[in-house]
Amino acid sequence: MSESDTFSQETVAILVSYNPDTDSVREALQSLASQCATVIVDNGSDADTLSHLKELVAGFDTAELISLGSNLGIACAQNRAINHVIQICDAVRYSLLLDHDSIPGPGLVRCLEETFVARQEQARVAAVGPVLYDPRDKKFLDFHKVRFGLWGKVRPDTLSEGQRVVEVDNLNSSGTLLANTVFRETGGFDSSLFIDHVETDWCFRAKSHGYRLFATTETQLTHHMGDDVCYYWFLKKRRMPYRSPRRHYYIVRNSLLLQKRDYVPLAWKLSNLLKLCFTFLYFCGYSPDRAKQRRHIRDGIRDGLKGISGVSGH
């Protein structure tokens, strides 16, 4: 199959950047160059980084850079880029969402498109996603779905040959291929959340409109979950992503905001409350930066309970 046969005219990758490692962005563009066009939307990177991004994009005929000038949040950046693509080309059916540290595997776009079309014959599909692989601990990240009334995990490495595509209730933003028609019908991403749980909210809204979500193990995306990885012992050695105090502010605040939304499943709400409790105990009690973590998590709880959204002054 020639490169022209694998290059998709129906998908545009949307890569949101904020002071990224430009080597990672280059690797992503190199992988995508034979798969689909790419729009990088920069969320207010510093002048040097933005200059490097401009030079980088200039080397790829299939890439475009949109600079927002300031950090407007991932939801706003994704909305701007997807609406930009829709306005200039109605033929583009899908948007592939990527973070600036995400590296798509070979053939990822075509595989996700084929999965979408195949499932669309039997269901109203909002989005499909790949397996996410974190190279730091060489593990695949779990899928999530409601099972027996509980928010459960599905381990990709335990699925049989006949289960290469599974229905899920949530997809990670990075690697998700969504239908632009569904994006418009659901009103896009909630920019008031700024960052964190943006895709969670959208997935649940899409499902409330009668759409379904699927994940496939036939293609993968390399992705770093969190700023780093930390380990703890509970019956066995376990891992969890480390996130900065500022990120924990948004995670906690937005989690509480989603608790109040009717279309969010009760199973997720209960599971998320337990996760918040553990986050509070671990990062406020044991993290080296626990003083800052306490302050930001406390403020996230306060603002979440008050219903305050948007960008924070932290």
Image (cartoon, rainbow, N blue to C red):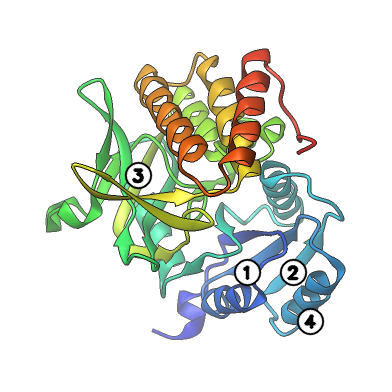
Secondary structure beneath label 2:
strand
Q: Name the residue located 59 percent from the left edge and 31 percent from the top edge.
A: 297
Q: How many marks?
A: 4
Identify the amino acid type marked 4: Glu
Q: How far apart in space, not on screen, are marks 2 and 4 (Cα)?
A: 11 Å
Establish if 13 lies above or below 288. Answer: below
Residue 243, x across and y down, in percent: 54, 48
Q: Which residue is mark 3?
A: 214
Residue 55: assigned label: 4
Establish if 262 lies above or below 217. Answer: above
Query: Contact, CB < 8 Å: mark 4 with mark 3?
Result: no
For the residue pair 288 and 101, the one nearer the viewer reads as: 288
Query: Contact, CB < 8 Å: mark 2 with mark 4?
Result: no
Query: Contact, CB < 8 Å: mark 1 with mark 2?
Result: yes
Residue 45, x across and y down, in percent: 79, 62
Establish if 176 lies above or below 306. Answer: below
Whichever of labels 4 and 3 marks the residue nearer the N terminus, that label is 4
Q: Name the residue located 24 percent from the left edge and 53 percent from the top edge.
A: 156
Q: Which residue is mark 1?
A: 37
Identify the amino acid type marked 1: Ala
Whether residue 140 is visible here, answered yes or no, is yes
Residue 290, x across and y down, in percent: 56, 41
Whichever of labels 3 and 1 marks the residue nearer the N terminus, that label is 1
Residue 64: assigned label: 2
Whichever of labels 3 and 2 marks the residue nearer the N terminus, that label is 2
